[in-house]
Image (tube, coloured by chain):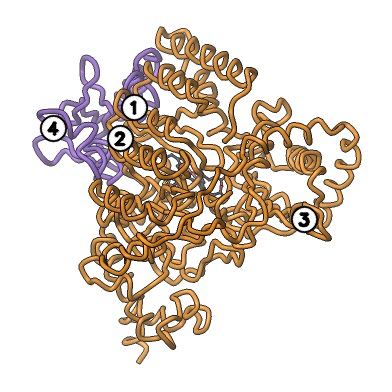
Chain colours: A orange, B purple
Amino acid sequence: MYNYTDFDTAFIKERNAQFRAQVERRIDGSLTEDEFKPLRLMNGLYLQLHAYMLRVAIPYGTLNSRQMHVLADIADKWDKGYGHFTTRQNIQYNWPELRDVPDMLDALGAVQMHAIQTSGNTIRNVTADHFAGAAADEIADPRPVAELIRQWSTDHPEFQFLPRKFKVAVTGSPNDRAVIKAHDIGLRMVERDGLAGFEVIVGGGLGRTPMIGKVLRDFLPREDLLPYLEAIVSVYNLLGRRDNKYKARIKITVHENGLEDFGARVEERFALIRPQFTGVDQQMLAAIESDFAAPEFRSAPDTEYQDARRHYPAFRSWADTNLSEHRAPGYAIVTISLKAHGATPGDATSAQMRLMADLAKRYGHDELRISHEQNVILPHVHKNDLPSVYSALRAAGLGTANIGLISDIIACPGMDYCALATARSIPIAQEIATRFDELKIEHDVGPLKIKISGCINACGHHHVGHIGILGLDRAGVENYQITLGGDHTQDATIGERAGPGFSAEEIIPAVERLVMAYLDLRSELGETFLDTYRRLGLAPFKAALYPEARANAA
Amino acid sequence: MPRAYIPKVVTANALLEGDVIYQTATGWSRNLAEAEVLTDEADADLRLIDASQQHDRVVGVYLADVDISGPTPKPTHFREDFRARGPSNYVHGKQEAPKHV
Ligand code: HEM
Ligand code: SF4
């Protein structure tokens, strides 16, 4: 894990002290809201529907047990005993009071965490594969690079007032678990002729004009990374539309100028600034890398694990669903579901956070990760420890065996919290999960991603959900639009709109009809929902969604 | 004939807690039932201006439509309904208050 240098610690302290003074001046009336708002946003503090919201960065989703404990303590002391983990590897507190926020930031600072650049038109929290450093399919750990980018982008004077927010994601695996094609810049670590480098993707994004990113460079040598990123962001800073908020993201810049023209400008700028990067960044990277050295994995047979699998069906079911392949023999990656049927996706109570922290400490080399699918991961657990881990999780309501299944839903906060929302997301997710739990067909349905957003901004990633649900306001009533066939992996695809939306009462039965249609349509047991959709297209699913239209046409 | 003015309340978020508040004849309340209902456009605009100047107490002031056919004002749009009531997934915010509507 990255450890703050003295510089980092001093910087955070100074910044928090500055914000404390700003909050005091806001409360005593010497700052107006118009003056204060940009300052609070620079420190991750939003004003939402019912309260303030503090968004804390969890850089590349990595944290240790001590940090997780502090997140739990903050939830108890200054919030309502829980936190909400988001798709951008952040945690959000939904109920802080204004005068407490400086104390919250100090508590975070004490364990090397902060809320800087979790808002505003800057380079946001750099995200990465949540299985980084553990996955069997990994070429290299993406986190040192993500940390380097964080250091370069934090408080970068040129990039504090970009045309719009800017998001960078990095993966070190060919199997993309970081949704790199839906980011402003997506980086995939690759190797060519023994040389380490990156495939650089630009101009992806969700929101009102969803776009899949395009390859700007298929191979960028590793030591060119920072100057090349700097070139991209400065070209965007210059060309990005500042006249229209809805056309300001880099995806529009690339689209309007053309990939070729945009790329040529980047290369020109890159050539100009490359000499200024004299190698210090590479020295920094080497130092960062030593912080991310892999833990010492123990070698032991996995007899106890195999025994537990044979004797306990519930454990086996959980193991089959929630474990992923680790690169070290005898180890597994554990995904802890924050999606108990009927619960709010992504929420964890302070007690649950502490339990996960303790399990990480005892069985997981003191590491935790937050996934963009709003779950928590113990990246390094020896298989023999899994029965103990599972029983502890289960006792805390964290043993749901549903990773990648229909109830493992991403849902944004929607109109229950978010000031921008046009409809609620959370109750829809809760009802779908509950319904399919009652039907007991979740495991039979197999891999299926439902993603729900409460407005067109698409925080819930609905465009890249196999089934995407977008909440809208139709004449003062909540209405839900379905998209189908989206995919967030290396084969990223934007889903197609299925047709007219559904009311809140109609949407659960509509999803049920879709899933039942899939079960009828699949060619064999192993064909997933997405594969079936790709084979057959929209028509049969549309017929299932709108049976009355078919009846009328007949 | 000019269209009838839809009755309004002045609403905002409290500066310190951030929660939803409504202007009453004399101050602010967390309870929509206690809000001052404005049935005259000119009146409403004046009350809005007055509220907007209270920088040290409130944030994001605006006028929200209400239905006054019952004994207390009710929101006409679902967004205002959630603001008046609190989130649907937990008994948090206003719903924790002892005499919640
Ligand atoms: C509740 C406060 C939130 C606000 C005010 C907010 C605001 C926004 C806005 C305005 C956009 C569109 C930006 C654009 O296209 O230019 C957006 C996109 C997005 N937000 Fe949020 N968001 C919030 C919460 C969340 C949460 C909880 C998540 C994770 C669940 C999230 C993750 C994302 C993602 C992934 C996108 C789309 C990706 C992209 O930028 O293309 N946000 N958000
Ligand atoms: S998608 Fe819309 S409603 Fe949901 S969190 Fe994002 S901005 Fe809010």
The answer to whether tags 4 and 3 share a subunit is no
Percent x, y for residue A122?
Answer: 63, 34
Q: Which residue is drawn at 31% across and 22% down?
A: B17
Asked whether, in this view, residue A411 is left or right of residue A258, the answer is left
Residue that badge 3 annotates: A216
Q: Which of marks 1 and 3 is nearer the N terminus?
A: 1
Q: Confirm or reject: label 3 Cβ below 8 Å from ligand 1.
A: no
Q: Is mark 3 on a helix, strand or loop?
A: strand
Q: What element carries label 4?
A: loop
The answer to whether tags 3 and 2 share a subunit is yes
Does the CB distance between marks 3 and 2 fall below 8 Å?
no
Specify the quadrant of the image occupied by residue A451.
bottom left
Label placed on residue A350: 2
The answer to whether tags 1 and 3 share a subunit is yes
Quarter of the image for the N terminus of chain A: give it: top right
Does the CB distance between marks 4 and 3 fall below 8 Å?
no
Disc number lying in front (4 or 3): 3
Mark 3 and mark 2: Cα distance apart in space = 43 Å
Disc number lying in front (4 or 2): 2
Asked whether, in this view, residue A129 is left or right of residue A514, the answer is right
Q: Earlier in the sequence, mark 3 or mark 2?
A: 3
Residue that badge 1 annotates: A73
Res A254 visible: yes
Percent x, y for residue A222?
Answer: 79, 46
Residue that badge 4 annotates: B100
